[in-house]
Image (spheres, rainbow, N blue to C red):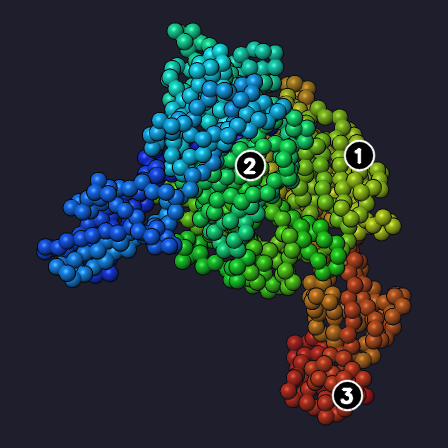
Amino acid sequence: MGYLIRMRTLCVLLVAALAAFAPIGGFGHDGIVHANLSPNGWIQLESSELYGDEIRIDWTILYPDSFHQSINLYRLPDESEITIENGEQDLISGNLNKSLEPGAYRLVITLMVGVDVLDTYIHEFVMPDPVTRLVHVFGSDGPIDDLVFRQTFPWSEEPLTAAEIPNPGKGYVTYAVEILPSGCFTMESNTYHFSIGGEVCADSAEAFIVQASDDTDNLVQLDAFYAYEDEEKGVLAGYLLLRMEIWGELKMDLYDREGTPHACEMYGEALYEFECELPDDPAYIQVDKFIQGVPAPTNVVIPMDDINLPENITVVDRDPRVNRIDPLIEFEDVPNDTEFAFYKIMPAQDSYWSSGIRYIPVDEGPYSFALENIEADHYDYRYVAIQLVDTAGNLYAKTAEFPIIDKMTEQDARIQYEDNGMEALHESYLPDNPSFRDIDWTEGGRAGTVTWTLPDTGEYALTAYDLYYSDSNQDPIRGEARVYVNHRLADTFEYMLEDVPEGAAYLEVVPLLREENQWTYQDYYGDSFFIPLNDRVTPLLDELAVDGNPVYPKPRQDGSSYYEYTAAWNADVAVVTASSMNGVVYVGDEGPAASVTATVYLNEPVKAVSIRVGTPEGDWSSEYDLVIAKEPAPDAPKLASLIVDGREIEPVGSLYSISVDHDASAVAVTASAGADVEIELAGVRQFGSVEAFIPITDDEMSLPIRLYDPATGREAEYVLSIVREVPDNLVLGVLAGWFDTGDDGYVYSGVPRGMTAGRLKERFVTVSGTVMMVRDREGVAVSDDHIVQPGYTIELIRGPKTQTIRLEMLSERLKSILGLPTDSPLAFVHIATLWIHHPEDLNGDGKIDSKDARLLLDEMD
């Protein structure tokens, strides 16, 4: 449901929302405590507090004998002295209480014995200018003529200056109130009542939302509302933060689209927990207040609509240091936004009270503004939350949450986690399908998204991932970011690499975890995993969805991937959508196009769909397998377990999949069901359990497993898919010579002069089923008795896989060892040097002897 968020969010956002009506430092007033000593140690400053327009300074004289003191106050920067009246200072107790105009000041406390100055303390401070706070009032037809903003701290009978700012057609009037930074005020009117009861303090927020009414005082201030679906109980649960001028009993109902109320239970006071019966079509929540025992509707209405939220939201950290976040948020207006008045921005919080909540008018975008700086740690999930306020002042329930990324590009080496109190957790939390999708198709340019499914970390809470760029040896180049893990929003991790640095071959990912119990916790870092950052220049499959649900690749051991999707047991068709950003797609027989939607008929329990991706010219570069498996019917007989070679396999719908080594020739399969269910496997029928030894005759095999329940007459069919893992490199080893899998492709060096193609093939050990051909310079296959010449290649073919190996003659390798030009002849002195200083087993018999010397001599020109 679009309006739902998870429980952990609620607690953090709720305490942030409380900030709208609490000054910094609690419900007292501004205070900064000092423990400063004068140069000689006889004067100690105890405190310096702003109290409205007054400065309150207290100090202590530590000198043990007789003394006298004086104080002088100067305005900066002109050093003009300010007169201090007798009632404003107490030299016996050591304090100064004085009202001052905004500006900078210096207080000088002088300690004297006789005419000698014993010590001096200088204290400088600033009296801040008044600030402007915006109060957005909904519910009046226009400006309220008798509205007064009364300063309650420090108390003043004179109304505050408040400028009216009409907003025609927006549903509210804005009042710009000028007040001291630590001041508080109330709203007074003889014609209107206001949802805010009591005082509002300037240091709690920059703007406030208030609802007004000229016919009822049954108003309640809604400061926060957050909800989540409790799947175990089947209810809508969450929290309300409410304030009332006159407290009373409340009730709450969740209405559906038909206008039927569904009861809610509320617990607490001010901060309420609630649980509501959850209808299929929730419309809004209404809060009532009991008046003389009868519930009466208040102004609090919380729409539950699945509204559009702001678009293209980005939250950027402008500080390159880890644990230091300087966030900048940017976003665009909501489409069709005439029903909305404000965005409510809930920035990341790191304290109970915060002044960070903002109300941004709709229809003034695009927006770009800085949030408060944050000092973070890996277990503090940081986010920006955005809600919408409509033109009646109602807060919508639906919430957008966006994580704040802690950039750490200043990090030039891997963090020493042990120095931060973390312990190593040597367990692999490698996700199923880590991938990098390069969207920069220029050669050498790389930018794109890394994605994977979040793994199960058991008793440990996965809190964040640290990302580093590393070179081809998997050594760190520099840090990229600390990304907080948000389990509430999705099961998939995603992060955008905007510009992969030159020399980066991998993204190293370090999981950060926490173990908590009632009183203690311990932080850990897990084993790294590495994602290749391949430069994409060929078209690939970028997005795949079935029935509108995204499907992600699953890896095989050989580095390839495949896709699986579970369909409902009674589904007749599945709609498959596949797209490529820089190529064209075929889904079965549908296509080619950049994005193809095809209908697949599910006339079998398991349906295989072929997806090809290539260039618009028709050169196919990639082929993918999508398997759609239907769930077994609810009343059909079911397999209790399927064990292959001693390993129990978990199904996807009615499909069981297993990968085996490339040289596997057979597997042992045991299928079990209820004792009264007949199982058919590989031609064998038995009740309860069947064991079979299945020969593997192909790289990909599908084995049906049929079940029959005589008591009900129901049947079911499962499929066991067996896939041989064929490595990309079809060469398992060489018996002689040198085989290299470097960045320049596959190279075999050490072909002796006069060697035939047949003898050369005998030097290779390849994956079973591989066909080997030697090709000349023109690419034509040669016979086994043909003499191999410079410029020849070997081609390996196994099913759809092909592999080309460039050949290097033995003489070329010898010249390279000696540092000779390629066109230089090999003389006897060169051969002697090689035999003395670089002896090699050239024929692969495990010995260095005269046979190897003969091969060297044969290479002389």
In this view, the residue farthest toward the bottom is 829
Instruction: Mark 1 vs mark 3: give the one in front.
Output: 1
**Residue, x 19% and y 50% (percent of image)?**
60
Local SS, label 2? strand
Marks 1 and 2, the one that precedes in the sequence: 2
Badge 3 is on which residue? 826
Q: Earlier in the sequence, mark 1 or mark 3?
A: 1
Q: Could you tell me which residue is drawn at 65 percent across and 63 percent down? A: 502
Judge whether residue 852 can be spotted in this image. Answer: no
Quadrant the C terminus occupies: bottom right
- Report the Cα–Cα distance between label 2 and label 3: 71 Å
Residue at 73 percent across and 67 percent down: it is 744
Residue annotated with mark 2 = 401
Kindly identify which residue carries mark 1: 598
Pinpoint residue 785: horizontal percent, then vertical percent.
Answer: 87, 72
> Which mark is nearer the camera, 2 or 3?
2
Image x and y of residue 623, in percent: 77, 47
165 vs 837, left or right, is: left
In the rendered image, the vertical position of residue 410 relative to residue 847, given as above or below:
above
In the shown orientation, is residue 137 left or right of residue 637? left
Which badge, 2 or 3, is on the more N-terminal residue?
Answer: 2
User: Label 1 crowding class (10 Å Cα cut-off): few <14, some 14-19, many 20+?
Assistant: some
**Camera-nearest residue between 625 and 210:** 210
Amino acid type assigned to the residue bearing label 3 in the image: Leu
